[in-house]
Structure formats: C-alpha cells, structure tokens
Amino acid sequence: MDFSIEVHDKRMAEIVDSDSSLEKVATGFRFLEGPVWDPYEKSLIFSDIMGNGLFLKDRHDSISVFRENSYLANGNTYDRSGRLLTCEHGTSRVTRLEKDGTSVVLASHYQGKELNSPNDIIVSGNGSIFFTDPTPGRMGRVGIPREQDLDFQGVFRIDPQGTLHLLADDFSKPNGLCLSLDEQFLYVNDTDLQHIRRFKVTPKGGLEDGRIWVELHGDEPGVADGMKFDSAGFLYCSGPGGVQVYDTEAKLIGRLLTPEIAANFTWGDEDLCSLYLAATTSLYRLRVKIPGNPLF
C-alpha cells in the first residue's frame, strides 16, 4: 500500500500538507519500535526488537549500531537529564543508561515477582517514570518464552525516589501511553481491545476514573501501540492503517495510512517537525506542520 492521508476533519490541513510524501530513511530491519530523538546530538535512537539491537540515526541519516545486544529492547525515552531509558523484553527490566555508559536497573520486580515485559515508557515533568507491562516479551515472536510471574498486565510508576508503584491492573494488554500537555491526564491504550483509556492523575501520582476515551477506527492491519501528543495538543496513536490523529475531545481528525504497520513514532530534526515512524522493517520520515515536544 502506498502512503496516503485520510481526512476526517478540516483541521488535518493544519497538521500536514495534503501532498506530503513519506520518505523511507532506512530499511532491512525485522520489527522496529521505540524511536526517540536527542535534540542536542540531533540523533534518533530506535529498537529492532526481533533483531535484538538498538540503532542510531545521526544528523546525516547514517545508521549505526548503538547497542548490539539490547535484551530485546522495545520502548525508549529520555529522562530530564538526557539519560536513555529502555524497556527490555528479554530481561523484564526498565533500565537507564548513564552518561559514563553504565546501565542501571530501575525496575525488574513488583512485590517479589518478575515484571511481565515492560513495553512503552514516558517521563513526567517531576521526573516520575510511567511504563506499561504487558506480556509479549514472554512470547516467542518478540520475546523469550517463559511463564508469567504476575497475574495481571499493569501500568506502573517509578517515583523520583525510585519506588515502584502499581497504578492500574485491569487492562487486557496495555501498550502505548502519554501524558496530556498539562500532565493532568494519563492516556493508555489497550492492544487487545483497540481503545484508548484516559485517567485523571491524582496529586500523589496515582490514577483514577480510567474510562474509555475512544475506540480506534478502521479494520486494516495495525493495533493500538505508540501514542504521543504534539505541541498543539493533537493526540497521535498507532492503529489500524497506520497512525490516527485525534483532538482533545476524542474526535478523529485524520489518519496517516502507511505502507507498513507503524508500531511507534516520534518527532525530530531541528524544528521537531519531522515525524519519524518505526514501521515493521523500515524507518520513515514525514514532514508535518506542528512540532512535537522536546523530552529534555
């Protein structure tokens, strides 16, 4: 399938030009995930889960190996100090890469039981780390087959002091997550149920009122996966057909229909107006009009 833009609301014209083209930056991978942009190094790090590696795209679009054995890394982000945080399927850990190159384990167990397989990860303004913990990393295709230790698939928070808190345990398969721009709400999607839920974030960092916010549109290949807000407050979510764009009232603005299943994405380049899509075997780039949000 060729790239196309499906318009459901005239505001889609504020987001991307109708004649924009999708550029293939690199290909030949197995299952791309977790792209994250470093605004200072002008580089993009992304995971190839099935290839068991982390890769780096530099400012000249050259691709190199960042980490050969990534422990089947999936989601990545940066903390407010510019340290790389990674969800590792193979070890059921959340790790932080220090500036000296050493790796620190931030979470691996909850109440004495091993986490399932941390999947996607974000950091709030006060340094709290939120991540989802479904089970794909305990299956053969993108993980290491092994029995599940926990009896639920949850959403967790690591507070600034390093303590792990369970926030929600009533998902079928939690995946992508993002905070609203004012950080008053946490959005978490469910891959099995193909919807997005919205939670109120309490003053102490807990969650409440996790109602269904929207059901994803379409029946093409693709599932609820990576999810982020741009700087204008439009929510992007991987889903059937490619990437779906919603306003703050859960109205579908449009869909970016991609030639490969898009698992995740981020904004990059000098103006943060290049949307980088990790789509199965290839890394793509689409120029958009509204920038993303810097991570640090």
Image (cartoon, helix red, strand yellow):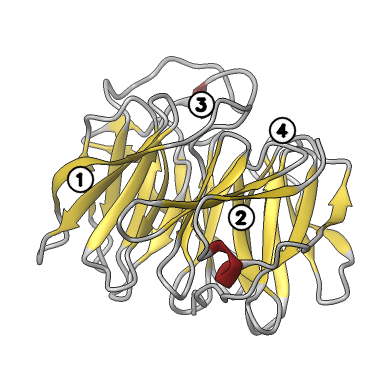
Q: Mark 2–mark 4 contact, CB under 8 Å?
A: no
Dot 4 alpha-carbon crowd within 10 angstroms: few under 14, some 14 to 19, many 20 or more: some
Q: Residue under circle 3?
A: 136
Q: Residue under circle 1?
A: 167
Q: Residue under circle 2?
A: 265
In the picture, which quadrant includes the N terminus?
top right
Residue drawn at (51%, 41%) of the image: 225
Q: Earlier in the sequence, mark 1 or mark 4?
A: 4
The amino acid pointed to by label 1 is Leu
Dot 2 alpha-carbon crowd within 10 angstroms: few under 14, some 14 to 19, many 20 or more: many
Residue 192's disc number:
none
Q: Spatial distance from mark 4 to mark 3, Cα to Cα?
A: 12 Å
Residue drawn at (34%, 45%) of the image: 188
Q: Earlier in the sequence, mark 2 or mark 4?
A: 4
| Image height of 259 relative to 36, above or below | above
Which residue is more in the foreground, 56 or 175? 175
235 left or right, relative to 67: left
**Does dot 4 land on a helix, a strand or a loop?**
loop
User: Residue 253: horizontal and vertical position, in percent?
Assistant: 48, 55
| Image height of 296 relative to 197, above or below | below
Q: Spatial distance from mark 2 to mark 4, Cα to Cα?
A: 18 Å
Residue 50's disc number:
4
User: How many numbered circles are shown?
Assistant: 4
The amino acid pointed to by label 3 is Pro
Dot 3 alpha-carbon crowd within 10 angstroms: few under 14, some 14 to 19, many 20 or more: some
128 left or right, relative to 271: left
Q: Earlier in the sequence, mark 2 or mark 1?
A: 1
